Image (spheres, rainbow, N blue to C red):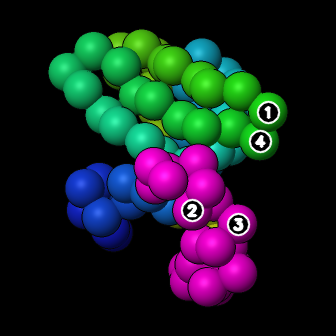
Amino acid sequence: MPDIRNMIGKEVLVTANGMQYSGVLIEISDTDVHLKGMFQWLTLPVSSVGAIVLKDRENNITELDLERWRMYIEPE
């Protein structure tokens, strides 16, 4: 199972309050999980999160995926 710190900057699936959210994991604090979704930012309370798993094909993030999300996670 991957360390949560290694998931930062990668596309993840977060299960919270019976729903599943998808996005790039930006930050995890004591109180919130922050994701950059395709069209909006998501902030979920840690207390509602049941699981955070990598969203990838065969447990590998491809270079194309990293390039696609780089504009959201790195300042210009």
Residue visible at 59% across and 72% down in the picture: 66
Say above or below: 36 vs 40: below
Residue density around tag 2, few if under 14, some if 14–19, many if 20 or more, within 10 Å: some
Spatial CA distance of label 2 from label 3 is 6 Å
Residue 69 in view (yes/no): yes
Secondary structure beneath dot 3 equals: helix
Residue density around tag 4, few if under 14, some if 14–19, many if 20 or more, within 10 Å: few
**Residue extending furthest toward the left:** 30
Labels 4, 2: front one:
2
Spatial CA distance of label 4 from label 3 is 11 Å
- Residue 37: image quadrant is top right
Disc 2 residue type? Answer: Arg
Between 41 and 45, the residue placed more toward the observer is 41
Percent coordinates x, y for residue 33 in the rendering:
41, 28
**Residue numbers of the magenta segment:** 57-76
Q: Which residue is denoted by mark 3 in the rendering?
A: 68
Q: Are marks 4 and 2 in contact (CB under 8 Å)?
A: no
Q: Which residue is denoted by mark 4 in the rendering?
A: 38
Say above or below: 22 vs 6: above
In the rendered structure, the answer to whether residue 76 lies left or right of residue 11 reads left
* Mark toward the start of the polypeptide (4 vs 2): 4
Q: Is residue 34 magenta?
A: no
Disc 3 residue type? Answer: Arg
Spatial CA distance of label 2 from label 1 is 15 Å
Disc 1 residue type? Answer: Phe
Q: Which residue is denoted by mark 2 in the rendering?
A: 70
